[in-house]
Amino acid sequence: MPYNLPATRVLMNNLRQVMAEDGDSRSRLDHVVRLIASTMVADVCSIYLREPEGTLLLIATEGLKPEAVNKTRMASGEGLVGYVARTAQPIAIEDAPRHPAFSYRPETGEDPFHAFLGVPILRTGGVTGVLVVQNRTERTYGEEEIDVLQTIAMVLAEIVHALVLAPAQPATPERRGRSNGGGNLKGRIFCEGLGYGRAVLHDPVVPAAKFFAADQVAEAARLDQGLIDLRASIDRMMMIDGAALGEDPRDVMEAYRLLAHDTSWSEKLHEGIRSGLSAEASIDRARREHRARMQSARDPYLRERLHDLEDLDNRLLRVLGGEDSKPKIQGDQNVLVARRLGPAELLEYAKAGLKGLLMEEAAASSHAAIVARALGIPAIGGIEDLTTRIEEGDYIIVDAEEGSVHVRPDDVVYDAYKSRVALRSERQAAYAALKGLPAKTRDGTHVSLMLNAGLDLDLDMLDQAGADGVGLFRTEFQFLVSETLPRLEDQIALYKRVLDRAAGRPVVFRTLDLGGDKVLPALNLQREENPALGWRSIRFALDYKGLFRRQLRALVRAAGDRPLTVMFPMVTVPDEYRQAKALLLEEVEWSFRKTGVRPSKLDLGVMLETPALGFSMQDLAGEVDFLSVGTNDLLQFFFAADRMTPSVSDRYDLVDPAALRFLKMVAETCEKAGIRLSVCGEASASPPVALCFAALGYRSLSMAASAIGPVKQALRNVDLDAFRTGLLERLDKPNGSFRNQVLALAAEHGIDTADS
């Protein structure tokens, strides 16, 4: 068998020497293809580079006509080479010219060659080129040969990047980082703001120096120890309180654990070591394959499994790398770039200082988006091909006011950015001057402006923003950032700190809002087609009464003899509220029997997130103290538009006649029932929207700290009664874009709507 492991190891060593050689890129690439052709006993070895527009350029060959290099181009998807690039999968053909996808290029002189084997060159999650070997004879390439060529392609990815791509985009000491602008990317705004800095890639990167194993026995032992440590850490995640979990078999976490113990996965990694790769390089090869397959996978279950496998690859790389595997954050001018990110990971980065956050996948990163808002980090998500278009060290402008990213900006873009930062600073200074003043309209209506929070550090903003209290404390964050369920004592300690730091100002604790896009590894047990409409929030809590009661007990114990305000999320029918209230009252009495202390006042509320509850509020008269509108979920349920689907998430607007009429009806019902009205969704952070809520009778608005200044300025400048009259007139006879009508009305009242 000509394709043997010792020969592959020799090739790896030879390729390493090529990386260390002097000389121009053309001669070194020629050396590379000669080495590969010799090792694979092939008549032809060719490298095709994927260009930005998707075409595939022949950049090196052994066996085809040399004059075709840098001239022969294949269109995206054209021929067998295009097929490999499009599918990110290898293809082996016994007689290529007879294949229906074959594209004949006479300038290459490929007429005599029949057998064809092509594999994708993968880097940072995308296809950057194709590696091809060909033979004159008709023959079938075996699985071992395909595997060997894929291993070679992984190493080749770094060589091509070092010899071709990196020199074409040299790093410079100036602020752009590269000679030409890298273009603009678009995404969804997660936290408004402007940021500028160097890109720091979240995913572990395997340096070229670590591709090859000097001692295979020692390298195999390193991998085995790494797998042992990885599996032990996952087993620890599984060791949770059974009483809190109830009877569910924990299918999802068990499946994840089984993947970590899957012998086929570990054997695949050992194959890489036997071929001459280091443990890190072998894992990286598997990770590239998982990512490429994920991009083309349509089946949701397969994508989820590939997500899990990629996560295991990343975890194992970090286990092996230790401190060296952590991203190198230097100084305070950094922009974090990630495909996916968990809230705990973002908190770790935030300690080092970040100027911006960019994420590729919006839905998987929703917790991180909320944490970014809490930290005040300009953040944009849902950016397609993000990690294939940004390199470590690139200079980046994060424009989280417009939802755009400028990669390697030129002087004109950078100067415009500086001007906008200066203007934003002027506005912030004007808002800061209002900090100690009440949000009181010109005609004397007072509106409470509250802070949305979920972390200890959020409370630092209470005084800085001049908030009247905490209108929404998201209690689930303590669960999301921990690998195990927080103990009762830990929950009590957190809630006590929140109440202490609020210093007598009201705090609205929202009970656990898990499920949907808030995945708790230890408890997210069911795979659902539409998790936003599924088993989540109060539905989840009422089914897991042990877990729910533990949280309620912690809230009661933390309050002691102070007032306690609790809000239940996603209540759909009155009976759900009544069940939750009954459990809370039982915990109050249990605590009183044990400690002799109970909250001096109990204030209970419901979140309006499902339209059904809006038509049931009269049934809760005398039972519930307040209602708080959760605009994020209410908007998606009201318009049947998934907020995590970019194509529809921005299609519908809360400033819409139907939505505002619904909110007006709810306000009138609650006023008759003696139920206080508030808002805790992100929409109230917009001054025109806040004015609409205030005009409809909502007297408490909760938002991110950065929004309190602009909203307070708008409220203090408006005659609310006159604004209400104008709003109702327009609601009665809407004409064209209703948001534009509201913006025009606000402008008539002297409200700045430039950023709305």
Image (tube, rainbow, N blue to C red):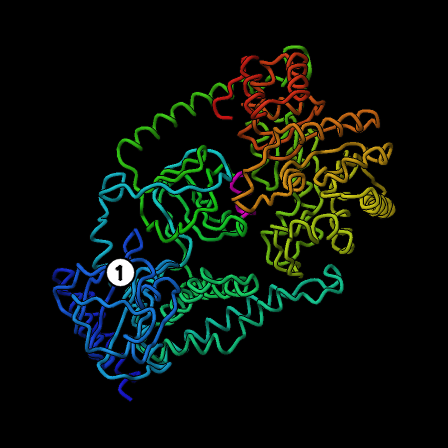
Whether residue 600 is visible here, answered yes or no, is no
- Relative to the observer, which residue lies in front, 688 or 434? 688
Whether residue 638 is visible here, answered yes or no, is yes
Verify whether residue 396 appears in magenta. no
- Residue 537 percent coordinates (x, y): 70, 48
- Residue 450 percent coordinates (x, y): 64, 29
Direction from residue 708 to residue 31 in the image, left or right: left
Quadrant position of the N terminus in the picture: bottom left
Q: In the displayed image of the protein, which residue is found farthest to the bottom? A: 1
- Residue 634 percent coordinates (x, y): 67, 38
Residue visible at 16% across and 63% down?
69
- Residue 752 percent coordinates (x, y): 51, 18
Residue visible at 49% across and 51% down?
361
Q: Tell me the magenta residue range.
A: 366-374
Direction from residue 349 to residue 510 in the image, left or right: right
Q: Residue tagged by mark 1?
A: 74
- Relative to the observer, which residue lies in front, 173 or 148? 148
- Image quadrant in which you'd find residue 272: bottom left
Verify whether residue 369 appears in magenta. yes
Vertical placement of residue 227 versus 433, above or below: below
Question: Residue type at mark 1?
Answer: Met
Residue visible at 70% across and 27% down?
661
- Image quadrant in which you'd find residue 115: bottom left
